[in-house]
Amino acid sequence: MSETLFKQVNYNLGNLIEYIALGEIGLPDLQRPFVWKNAKVRDLFDSIYHGFPVGYFLFWQNALADGIKPIGTDQKQKVSKLLIVDGQQRLTGLYAVIKGVPVVRENYKKEVIEIAFNPLLEKFEVADAAIRKDRSYISSISKIWGDNTNIFALVRQYLENLKASREIEAEEEERIQKSFSKLINILSFPFTALELSGNTNEEQAQEVFVRINSKGKPLNQADFILTLMSVFWDEGRKQLEKFCQETRMPSTGHASPFNYFIEPDPNQLLRVAVGLGFKRARLKYVYSILRGKDLQTETFSEEIRIQQFEVLKKAQEQVLNLQYWHDFMKVLIQAGYRNGRMISSENNLLFCYTLYLKGRIEYKVEEFDLRQVLARWFFMSSMTGRYTSSPESTMESDLARFRDVKTPEEFLETLKQICDETLTRDFWEITLPNELATSSPLSPSLFAYFASLNLLEAKVLFSNLKVSELCDPTIKGKKSSLERHHLFPKAYLKSLGISDTRDINQIANYALVEWGDNVNISDQIPAQYFPNLKERFSLKKLERMCYWHALPDDWENLEYRQFLIQRRELMAKVISDGYHKLCSGKKEDKFEASNISIEELVSGGETTDVEFKSTLRTNLHTGEKDPRMEYDCLRTIAGLLNRQGGKLIIGVADDGDPVGIEIDGFLNEDKIYLHLVNIIKERLGSQFMLYIHPRFDDYQEVRVLTVECWPSKSPVFLKDGKDERFYIRTGASTSELTGGKMQEYINQKFK
């Protein structure tokens, strides 16, 4: 038979309360959020009063208790010989009521649990205003066990108050006295405890807990470490608790850790400190050495314990540094994330904070560079759900990548390398569109899309206000200023026979609109409301809005499932553009005009990235519309997209003389703009409008059309009847590539 890990010990309630008060039993829950409802505490006292069993306790002997003075500023008289593993909430409730001390709730507000008692009915209740006025109740049983309580005087006072409201028979008075006596004597109530030996390791302790307790919150390594802190460094645990409490409420006149991203728990910040101080994500071995265990000899040493707690103290001081904490929040803002509702993984945020502290403290990385690269890292790890499953293993692996890193440059390069390894071409084109095929409102890819809209300085759909302005967490109202609108309304989809909630609530069917527009759109179908709303904007602004909000060409008339497929691909492209803007650190909007004037462009003549065309569709020799003119313009656009981008200026002759767009015979600029967009979509592909941005300019008293092209991320082919041709810019001309040369160029440029 294997050696028994525990022994059975009997206590009574009074002994347990006294041992806790002296500190011999470590009960950290007096400083941790108490999750039991008051009614549950009432029921616990009722069961004890009536003699029903209420379960056992599981204690763990402290291997270093003998002869060691407590660390910290608390008032415990002794070091805890026993650490409680199971039964913390029961003991906290019993101790808090019997001693009349407050508990800390989940919102970190203190509360005294008042349990009332009716001696005649022998009934317990949670005290409220009505019960406090009811003279048949003693409003708080805590006074029964007060240090200065005279029980005879208390009973006499109770009887006098009750007699003032009604007559009391002798039999009732005797029953009342017996009830008080019975209540006082619950301190003799027997408890059984299983005590694990000091040589039991944390894995065995947790295994015992799991095997004998199928209910309650499972223990983890952080719980064990926090319990050790209560014994050996109570001041440090209180600092963690205070910091976490202050993140939940705005400060008034003093610096505080309050923020709009996270309200951390002590165990979360403990993990950051462990990652920073011990360079570990797994807490298993850290717990052992904090107990003072020599991992080689398997023995416990006070010296080791003191040394390791010093490491933890230093790391925690840096983790709780308010300057570091708030400077890190700027990383999240720079990554496009504006509030906690956009954070799908707190693990990711906290591990990014660990990396931030490593970069700032250990590697002395310049703040500007650190913030930019970590914003890129946070975007990547948030979007991919890097720490969603097996977070400890993934964090441990990531921390291991830095063990041989020596310089600030190597630190930043390692972060960039992991990002590049993760966000491959296949991720952007295959994985991400597939991950957008979900109805989960907490999808990391959806929040990455919202972050990209912030990075691209996008405006809300059908609005002139920026997404980032309406994502401001400080703006509060009865209605959210920014709402998710079903582009294809639920009622319309149900009329088409699409009734499954997962199909209706696909995130590709949502767009960000202002609350008022959402109400006005209501259940209208896209073909009804979109034509009216788009009249608010010029064609140029509408193109930009459709790009930001990933609306496919003629989306309002598409079949629903085809719309979802196309929109996911466009959303993935917007996310890609946002991320790559974040990587480049550039501030410019790709839609905005270049700072170079049209006169400077024309005076420089035709180059690799600038070409002139006299007209869009008119043959100047015949004066008639000629499809060859359109083909020449499209060929230039394709060549610019396939090379390094550039500008096509329509309305300027080859020698730079002004011709003007009026000669093409369009009714107005909107008509020529719409015609150009249509032929681009028809012969190049609507997806490439992401990289093509026309605008009108004045040049020597005529109007010209400047088509600004950005380098495409995939090859662009021009339809020529049944054929597709591939063009690139070479010098001041556009050349066609075919066969092996075309394939070689595509492989080098786009793969």
Image (spheres, rainbow, N blue to C red):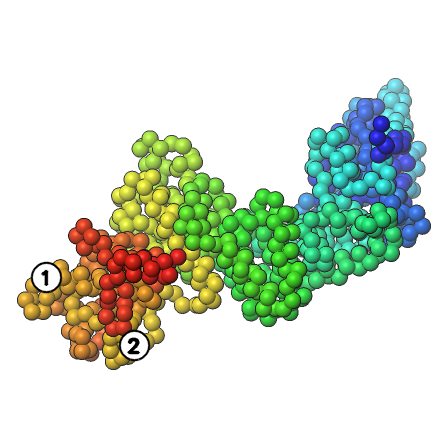
Rendered residue at 46%/54% (across/down): 424
Q: Nearer the viewer, mark 1 or mark 2?
A: 1
User: How far apart in space, not on screen, are marks 1 and 2 (Cα)?
Assistant: 30 Å
Count residues near mark 2 (Cα–Cα under 10 Å), then give few for <14, some for 14-19, many for 20+: few
- Asked if residue 541 shows in the view, the reply is no
The residue that appears at 81% across and 33% down in the rendered structure is: 57
Question: Is residue 677 shown above or below 165?
Answer: below
Query: Which label number is shown at residue 249?
Result: none
Residue 484 vs residue 565, the one in the foreground:
565
- Residue 728 seen: yes
Amino acid carrying mark 2 in the image: Ser
* Residue at left offset 31%, top offset 32%: 495
Q: Is residue 512 left or right of residue 261?
A: left
Which amino acid lies under the numbered mark 1 shown in the image of this protein? Lys
Q: Which label's residue is closer to the chain start, 1 or 2? A: 2
Task: Specify the quadrant of the image occupied by residue 149.
Answer: top right
Residue linked to disc 2 = 597
Within 10 angstroms of label 1, few (less than 14), some, or many (20 or more) residues?
some
Question: Residue 86 at what x, y percent from top left?
Answer: 78, 36
Q: Residue 420: x, y in percent?
A: 50, 58
Against 129, residue 309 (above or below) is below
Q: Return the residue at label 1.
A: 625
- 579 vs 683, nearest the viewer: 683
Q: In the depicted view, which residue is nearer to us: 388 or 544?
A: 388
* Rendering coords of residue 173 (x, y %): 88, 23
Q: Quadrant of the N terminus?
A: top right
Residue at horizontal 46%, vertical 66%? Answer: 584
